[in-house]
Amino acid sequence: MGLEPGLFSAIVAAPFGGIGIRTDGERLQELVYLPSGHAPRAGRDPVAREAAAQVAAYLDNPDFPFALDLPPVGTAHQRKVWDTIDAIPRGAVLTYADVARRIGSAPRAVGQACGANWFPLVIPCHRVTATGGIGGFARHHGGFHQSVKRWLLQHERVPGF
């Protein structure tokens, strides 16, 4: 599967497989979409347990508001993109071009920032789509990651997905 299960401080089961949670014991480090085959794992530290509880709550209820302490990561441009994406309400999407116009950037740069997102779900890059369709997801076009994006948009009841 390519990802060593020991990398994750917790793994939350999801309809598409799982969500791996990495922490350093004190801070959240990363969330990763995992294909089927990764056994769920309870959090091995308080940060992982809290993140796992919030991810599970979102999977049960797409209106669940995340309240996780995210470390400051990314470039100034990436943070601008992520802040814009974070403001997209559940049930809505913006295109890469929409986000680019809002921050004075280019759609390709927005897509690259989306792909560099360390905290998917919490910073909902799945709410950014191509002008003519679903677009890529997590630096992938098609396959597992695109099916995750489609599931998330359907979970959030976005029309047309």
Image (cartoon, rainbow, N blue to C red):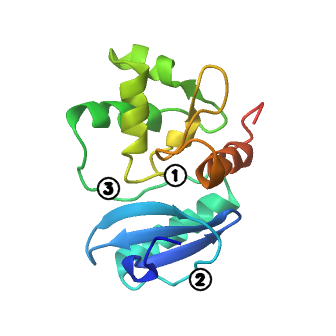
| Mark 2, other Cα within 10 Å: few <14 / some 14–19 / many ≥20 | few
**Looking at numbered disc 1 in the image, what kind of residue is underneath it?**
Leu
Q: Is residue 134 above or below residue 24?
A: above
Q: Is residue 35 above or below residue 41?
A: above
**Looking at numbered disc 3 in the image, what kind of residue is underneath it?**
Leu
- Depth check, mark 3 against mark 1: the one in front is 1
- Judge by depth and name the residue closer to the eye, 98 or 130: 130
Secondary structure, mark 1, is: loop
| Mark 1, other Cα within 10 Å: few <14 / some 14–19 / many ≥20 | many
Q: Is residue 46 above or below residue 143?
A: below
State the residue position of label 2: 39
Residue at position x 56%, y 25% in the image: 94
Report how far apart the C-alphas of labels 3 and 1 lie in the structure. Answer: 12 Å
Residue at position x 37%, y 53% in the image: 118
Residue 66 bears which disc, if any?
Answer: none
State the residue position of label 3: 70
State the residue position of label 1: 121
Q: Is residue 23 above or below residue 76?
A: below
